[in-house]
Image: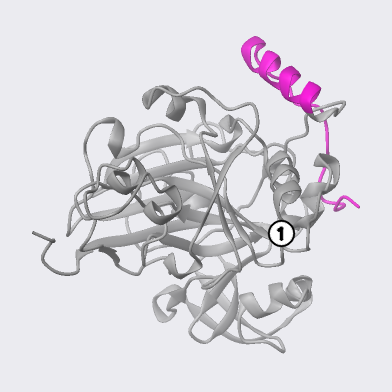
Amino acid sequence: MEPQSCRWSKTHQSAGSSRRHSLKLALQGCPIVVEYRCLSELVLDTGVPPPAGLAQAAIGADAPEQQPDRDEGVTLLVAQTTLGIARVLGTRYEVLDVGRATVSDLLTSGQFSQLEGAKVSATMERELVTLVAPMPRPGKIVIVGLNYNDHAVEIGAELPLVPRVHLTSSSAVIGPTEDIPLPRIADMAVDFEGEMAVIIGEPATDVTVAAAWSHVAGITAANDITARDVQDGSNLHVAGPNVGLAKGFDGFKPLGPAILSRDSVREGQALILRTLVDGEVRQESNTAEMHFTVPELVSRISQYTTLQRGDVILTGTPGGVGVSSGRFLRAGQLVEVQLEGVGSLRNRIVATSQPLS
């Protein structure tokens, strides 16, 4: 059943986009394409001056000329802190009195919805809170490739007729402010990929596009860090090409800083998505530009493997990645991924040891 706060409708597309969706619909036997828009006035205040143009709703800067419509219902933005689960209200964090200590526990036990009416045990300001990854060890991390047209164009590829997916290691997950270590075996071509991540709330096996959204718990921000030389097979120390390994090194999957619940989301998905390196905007797009929508991704992936509670789907990255310009990440650089309605990841790149000779 669709959540009451979601209003569904047909999505208007440009001529080229309409042809693309017509092809997908023929393959899936589905009468319409359904998309959603994630809406929230509440996100995390990172305490760092944001780049010009980011919505005030995102991290306290001046609002852009057009902001996405706001949901009239209650917005639930939940963060995992060292003191427990907290509801995020601007710069205020309300630690919730629930029977389980972590968001991960609530998700995997099917009790995530309990957070909506949970009692508050403590209230703190942002500077007193230490954030950790909301899902530190998901059962599966599913990576979606080539889901934005501008990214496909910049690497000389065509958009796929069906989602291109890979699995990678859950031990790659780190929190929203932890350091990203450059792997000793592959430190020369490490790249960023800012993305919206979807967290599964209910098991999904071969579900339809129409039913897929009800299996989602919420969304968060992700950085799909990738060792390009492992991905393309040019690394002499790793047998390849190997996409899963290229994306699965320890520290290569920052997640957070919070989860925006499914019931805080409605039709569309017009969320601003940015990646910055040392304050320079490298990626800037909108999740409405995704080739496959979240319901389409969940449906298709559930035909390959059962999605369990707490599994994470990274929905693809827009254009502007480092491999397109040869500008890879180096030790000391700060990488930020900003997702409107959710907040910002801010991770420092660090060297682990001397490279292999």
User: In this orientation, which residue lies closer to the viewer: 178 or 61?
Assistant: 178
User: In this orientation, which residue lies closer to the viewer: 163 or 117?
Assistant: 163
User: In this orientation, which residue lies closer to the viewer: 228 or 287?
Assistant: 228
In the drawing, does residue 270 fall left or right of residue 2?
left
Give the x, y percent position of residue 337: 41, 51
Q: Which residues are magenta?
A: 1-27
In the drawing, does residue 356 fall left or right of residue 269?
left
Mark 1 falls on what kind of element?
loop
Give the x, y percent position of residue 340: 53, 48
Give the x, y percent position of residue 78: 61, 69
Residue plotted at (49% across, 71% down): 133
Quadrant (top left/top right/bottom left/bottom right) for the C terminus: bottom left
Q: Is residue 215 above or below residue 208?
A: below
Give the x, y percent position of residue 212: 79, 48
- Residue farthest to the front? 239
Q: Amino acid at mark 1?
A: Leu
Q: Which residue is mark 1?
A: 307
Query: Where is residue 315, by image quadrant?
Result: top right
Residue plotted at (45% across, 53% down): 244
